[in-house]
Image (spheres, grey):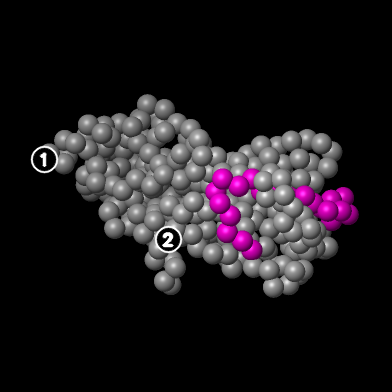
Amino acid sequence: MLAQAGAENRFGQIAFLSSGTPEADAALVRLETRYGNVAPEQSDVIVALGGDGLMLQVLHRFMGSGKPIFGMNRGSVGFLMNEYQESGLRDRLASAHASTVHPLIMRATTVDGRVEVARAINEVSLLRQSYQAAKLRISLDGKERMGELVADGLLVATPAGSTAYNLSADGPILPLDAPLMALTPISAFRPRRWRGALLPNRAVVTITILEAEKRPVNAVADHFETKNVAEVNIEMDHATGLVLLHDPGHSLDERILREQFG
């Protein structure tokens, strides 16, 4: 009874959001019948019903609001989500473990001089857009560290995103609380044996595209894409914290740790 009362006080107003699939929409109807549903702006907590794609959309939508997000898997992968269960939701919210993640901020300058700014919760990736490999120069805090990387691309990942595209590109898995970013090449050709680097999360990464018009490169911050970039600056936005809620024993840092052991 006390746990239930505490949960009601802390998360009295719940906003449910669906990914729009039939499975998620059906869950939305059942849950709002049981718990009610308010507009996200009026809520104490947002419950996202879908998969990891929806979770990233919700985190971006409410970035800077301070609202905690509790996901329940009605999608496919669901790495960021909790198990779907309709009963006892308020108790689950009351006992949930909170993980705070910080996004990356990307400032991309295009070949025609435009500057695009976007944030990424998982990673910022640079990708070649023609049959020719990209040629990239890497600088950290204004100091050149690699004069030329020839590759399909390059990405900078947060700890939370280190198990996503970064892992597929053979990048390292980072503990959630590690003060690091992963710098990972995508199909590197030269230097052939370069596997990337672990960077302090206070570093400013500058990627200069060599032969930008001949070898066009696009920059992507999660789902936001900028075409034909000439230079990209990437750093962690420590002023913005995103709060994810997970059931005890299934926190995001616990899931990342499990990934390291297969």
The residue drawn where x is 53% and y is 43% is: 103
Which numbered tag is attached to residue 1? 1
Residue 113 appears in the picture as rendered: yes
User: For this rendering, which residue is in front, 256 or 224?
Assistant: 256
**Crowd tier of the residue under label 2, counting other residues whose Cα lies within 10 Å: few below 14, some 14–19, many 20 or above:** many
Q: Is residue 69 left or right of residue 146?
A: left
Check disc 1 and give the amino acid type.
Answer: Met
- State yes or no: residue 139 in magenta: no
Figure quadrant of residue 194: bottom right
The residue drawn where x is 50% and y is 54% is: 159
- Position of residue 3 relative to residue 255, above or below, is above
Q: Are marks 1 and 2 in contact (CB under 8 Å)?
A: no
User: For this rendering, which residue is in front, 69 or 249?
Assistant: 249
Q: Is residue 221 left or right of residue 150?
A: left
The residue drawn where x is 54% and y is 64% is: 172
Q: State the CA–CA distance, disc 1 to disc 2.
A: 33 Å
Q: SS at mark 2? A: helix
In percent of width and height, residue 142 lies at 71, 45
Which numbered tag is attached to residue 209? none
User: For this rendering, which residue is in front, 258 or 76?
Assistant: 258
- The N terminus lies in quadrant: top left
Q: Is residue 65 left or right of residue 155?
A: left
